[in-house]
Amino acid sequence: MDIYDKLTLLYSAKEISLRIAEMGKELSKNFDNKEPIFIGVLNGSFIFLADLIRTVSIDCNIEFIQLKSYEGMVSSGKVEVIKMISSNLNNRHVVIVEDIIETGNTLKFLYDKITQSFPKSITTVTLLKKNMKNQLNFDIDLIGFEIPQDFVVGYGLDYNQKYRNLDGIYHLSNNNNA
Ligand code: IMP
Ligand code: MG
C-alpha cells in the first residue's frame, strides 16, 4: 500500500521552510549577543531543530533531551526522561524547541525541570500547536502553525515511529478506508 493513501497534506516542505525562516530571524534578533542554548526534544523535533538552527544567524549552542509521553495516537499523560542533557543551564538563555504541543504535559514537565537549573531565561518554541485547551500556565513564545486537533505526521512527527521521513506535514486518517 502506498504510504500516502491515508495522508492529507497540511503544510508542504516549501511552506514549512518559509515559516521557519521567519522564526529563525525573530530568534536571531531576540538573542543577539546572548548565546542561547537550544534544547531539541527528541525524537519529534530533530528535523525542525536542524532546519531552524540553520536559519539562525547568531552564536548559539545545541542540546537534545529525549522524553516519552505518547503511545500510538493518545498522550499517556505521564512524561519520562529517556536521555538527559549534559550542559549546565545555570544562568543561560534556554530555548526549548518542540515539534508539537497538544495537552501541554510534555512542555510543562520540561519547563519545570529546566527551571530547577536556574537559567537566565526560558523561551518556548514549537513548530505546531493544536488548537485546544492545554495544561500550560505560561505562554508559548513562538509558534510555527496553529492546527486543528487531528493527528498529524511527517517532518519528524511519527505514528508508532513511522512517517518521520516525510518532508511535509500530513493529517493521518485513522479510518482504514480513507
Ligand atoms: P502533549 O504532551 O500532549 O503536549 O504532547 C506532546 C508530544 O506528543 C509531542 O511532543 C509529540 O511528540 C506527541 N504528539 C502530540 N500530538 C501529536 C500528533 O498529532 N502527531 C505526532 N505526535 C504527536
Ligand atoms: Mg515532542
Image (cartoon, helix red, strand yellow):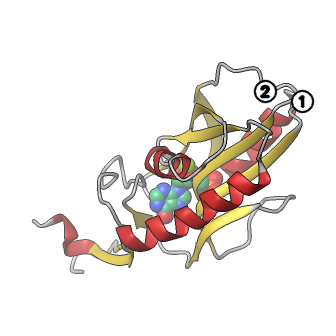
For the N terminus, the image quarter is bottom left
As drawn, 134 above or below 38 = below
Viewer can see residue 104? no
121 left or right of 111? Answer: right
Which element type, helix, strand or loop, lies under badge 2?
loop
Closer to the camera in the image, 132 or 119: 119
Which element type, helix, strand or loop, lies under badge 1?
loop
Amino acid at dot 2? Leu
Quadrant in the picture for residue 13: bottom left
Write down the residue under mark 1.
Answer: 118
Closer to the camera in the image, 21 or 110: 21
Residue at coordinates 76% horizontally, 61% vertically from top-left?
140
147 left or right of 106? Answer: left
Residue at coordinates 86% horizontally, 36% vertically from top-left?
115
**In the displayed image of the protein, which residue is found farthest to the left?**
1
Write down the residue under mark 2.
Answer: 89
Picture coordinates of residue 84, whole percent (x, y): 62, 24
Q: Residues within 10 Å of mark 2 (few under 14, many from 20)?
A: some
